[in-house]
Image (cartoon, grey):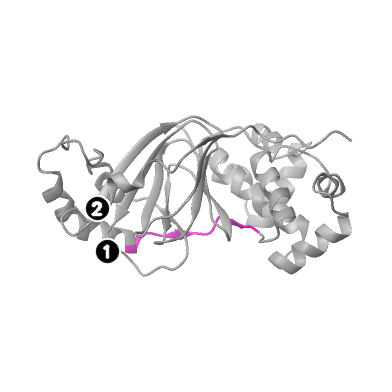
Amino acid sequence: MPPLAATPIYSVASLTPHLYAPDALRPLRAKEHFLKADTLVELHSHPWPQLTFSTRGVIRLSTEDGSYIVPPSRALWVPADMPHSVTLIEDAELRTVYLHSWLGPAWEKCEVLEISSLLRALMLALDTTPDGLPPSDPHAAQRERWIAPLLVDELERATQIRIDVPLPADKRLRQLCETLLRNPASRATLAERAEAIGASERTVARLFRDQLGTSWQQWRQQAVLAHALPLLARGMAVSQVASASGYATDSAFCAMFKAATGKSPTAFQHKKK
């Protein structure tokens, strides 16, 4: 059996968070980066919380405990001191807002949030110039102090969405999970995936139960849903989403999707006017 193929990843460092450190004078700091699909922003952490979102393109942020799919309609709250990495599922304009440690809600876990029009406008209004260069707006610090309380209030009002995919601590099982997340279209069986990490199918099935409290089939379904929902939201045809999710037929994908969500895939598609 040939080895399971994984999408090539181009790694970059942590995108210089130290050049955007928030403080009492500038309680909100924003930065932006244009990154290509399959880029991996390596694991890193910092002593302040952040909001991560993209103005275009879908990203996946991973922590030790899980993986979160973030399309442009959503933002992800990451608590302070939490190690995380970011994978670009497609070309994206990545935006990050850092908050001073005394700002924001006391959420201890990552939270996927719907972005309201006001929240988006507030985040995009922040200056993105790094330390060491003059801000493009000479009044940036004052505006950040004015924007901060309204942004936090809007953040706390935001609807929380559950589309996270839990990840295991076991290194072999995590390798298997990460391979599927990078290439959900692969139709490899569990036995083939287990062989690729040097384990038996029975061992892998037990690890899923012990590490994640779920079966392989249930975990894969959650991973597929997290992958498929942003594609549907962008208006991709159901047949294309089914193929990109590893399903041989549209009907099998639709049956799984409706059983899991109670709705057909078309109910989640963005309707172009």
Could you say where residue 120 lies in the image, as x and y percent from the top left?
31, 46
The label on residue 190 is none
Q: Quadrant of residue 228?
A: top right
For disc 1, the marked residue is: 103
The label on residue 28 is 2
In the foreground, 56 or 99: 99
Query: Which secondary structure, mark 2?
Result: strand
Quadrant showing the C terminus: top left
Left or right of residue 81, residue 247 in this image: right
- The answer to whether residue 212 is magenta is no
The amino acid type found where label 1 is placed reads Leu
Could you say where residue 11 lies in the image, as x and y percent from the top left?
53, 36
Identify the residue shown where x is 27% and y is 66%.
Answer: 102
Could you say where residue 265 lies in the image, as x and y percent from the top left?
62, 44
Left or right of residue 147, residue 10 in this image: right
The amino acid type found where label 2 is placed reads Leu
Q: Are marks 2 and 1 in contact (CB under 8 Å)?
A: yes
Could you say where residue 142 lies in the image, as x and y percent from the top left?
11, 50
User: Start and end of the magenta stretch?
Assistant: 156-167
Left or right of residue 245, residue 194 in this image: right
In the foreground, 161 or 197: 197
Q: Quadrant of residue 236?
A: top right
In the foreground, 117 or 263: 117
Identify the residue shown where x is 17% and y is 34%.
Answer: 136
- Rate crowding at label 1 as few (under 14), some (14 to 19) or many (20 or more) other CA atoms within 10 Å: some
Quadrant showing the N terminus: top right
